[in-house]
Image (spheres, coloured by chain):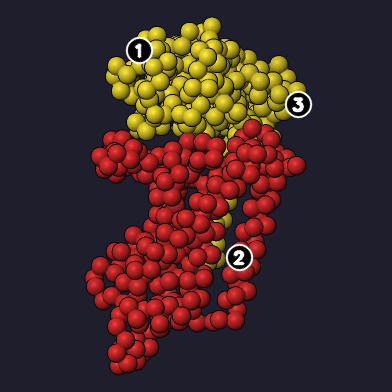
Amino acid sequence: MPLSVHDIAAIRLTLELASLTTLLLLLIGTPIAWWLARTRSRLKGPVGAIVALPLVLPPTVLGFYLLVTMGPHGPVGQFTQSLGLGTLPFTFAGLVVGSVFYSMPFVVQPLQNAFEAIGERPLEVAATLRAGPWDTFFSVVLPLAKPGFVTASILGFAHTVGEFGVVLMIGGNIPGVTRTVSVQIFDHVEAMEYAQAHWLAGGMVVFSFFVLLALYSSRRFKPGFN
Amino acid sequence: MHPVHRFCTALLLCLPLTAVADDVQVAVAANFTAPIKEIAEAFEKETGHRVVTSLGPTGGLYTQIKNGAPFEVFLSADDGTPAKLESEGEIVPGSRFTYAIGKLVLWSAQPGYVDEQGEVLKKNDFKHLSIANPKTAPYGLAATQVLDKLGLSENVRPKLVEGGNITQAYQFVATGNAELGFVALSQVYKDGEITGGSAWRVPDAMYEPIRQDAVILKKGADNPAAQALVDYLKGPQAAKVIAAYGYEN
């Protein structure tokens, strides 16, 4: 058996983290993307820029600030402590929070593009048919933006699976809690266990390739919506 | 010639100039971060050579060396890795020597948190105890030896958080995310005293001595600056700095 118990635990944890993060991001990201796609507010630029920050910031910056703000002396840490939740670093919940920030642009941007591509017209038609805003959203916008949701989910999931720097900086490498596949690979390499590293690293390459293959093949037939 | 091309050509012309033998590329184990800075500065002033340091965990640096990293001198956090490199023919024969013996300390950023006998470990009312990864970092391994000696390994296991190297183990404690942790004395010690927080200097008998060996790597065989740096490390000025950070030498 090429994979150890720890390797399998890491794979499981990574899949749990990526699933939960993607789910949360679809819930949080949809209204943000909708707002960004529709608004004429002057805040559109700054909010768009903040959402896109993780694209350009090194994970070390994000990880460092998360560690400091979520720590016992940071504002978030003081808040979670006052709720009796303790602090977030070294916990699975902490990784989820970090991943939500880290993968945010990969979910929001495809959704925003999809919403923008729909344009005014279908919404106006829906309004003339007396559809309320919620009805319009679920009956008109969601079906039209479906390819955008598919892209957003795949990218959000895959990007979280590939997360390393943030996990390393706030995780504390606890088996079954914060030791994800990318950290486990790092450990194997550092410990000169190249054979084990190859199995996991090779697996990541194959996984990532097929995820992207699925994404790009599905896109070929549905041009227009990112 | 297009200005961009001209610029690129100019850059290419500069390359051989910056790579002359007066630079020495040194890979340094993370725990020696502070002292190497001080030593390199003094060395540069005295000799005119330039020291380029790369910091990292010993295991990681080993992997990089094995895969063609341009390091000429390697200051390890242990003696096993340099010995391995020697047996693999990666070093200048006979260049291996111990430059420092590392000391382990149980440290907290909060004053008064860690008592001078380390009883705080037995009380066990902390949430997180930070150590370096015992698989890759000698100080992490030493920390697990101390916990074994105290018979506390099982009790504290659920509370252990691991840094990728000793710097990260320190960072977890310094930011307060872990109440306490085993770090290198050199990280919290200067000129005979602990620089902040509270600490228990773990008795030498509780862990295998952390002999930190240095070697000249094959890539540095013909670089006089590499030899000069090693000579300087063995000399009295460097010894003073090394001792000031709490190492034995």
Kindly indicate whether the residues beneath marks 1 and 3 are on one polypeptide chain: yes
For the residue labelled by badge 2, is the local secondary structure a helix, a strand or a loop? helix
Same chain letter for marks 2 and 1: no
Which chain does the yellow colour mark?
Answer: B
Query: Do the residues at discs 3 and 2 belong to one chain?
Result: no
- At x 42%, y 15%, the residue is B122
Chain holding disc 3: B
Mark 3–mark 2 distance (CA, rounded to whole Å) = 43 Å
For the residues marked 2 and 1, what is the alpha-carbon distance in whole angstroms? 54 Å
Q: Position of residue B234 (x, y in %)?
A: 56, 13
Name the foreground residue: B37 vs B143.
B143
Q: Which mark is residue A212?
A: 2
Question: Residue B235 got which mark?
Answer: none
Mark 1: few/some/many CA within 10 Å (<14, 14-19, 20+): some
Image location (x, y in percent) of residue B72 = 62, 30
Identify the hue of chain A: red
Which amino acid type is shown beneath numbered disc 3?
Answer: Gly
Q: Can you give x and y, in whole percent of width and height, for residue B15 in the image?
A: 57, 45
User: Disc 2 marks which amino acid?
Assistant: Leu
Can residue B139 be seen in the rendering of this structure? no
Please name the residue that numbered disc 3 is placed on: B89
Residue A164 is at least partly visible in this image: yes
State which quarter of the image contains the N terminus of chain B: bottom right
Chain letter of mark 1 equals B
Question: Badge 1 is on which residue?
Answer: B115
The image shows residue B237, relative to residue A198, as above or below, that is above
Position of B237 with respect to B219 (left or right) is left
For numbered disc 1, what is the local secondary structure?
loop
In the rendered structure, which disc, 1 or 3, sits on the residue that comes first in sequence?
3
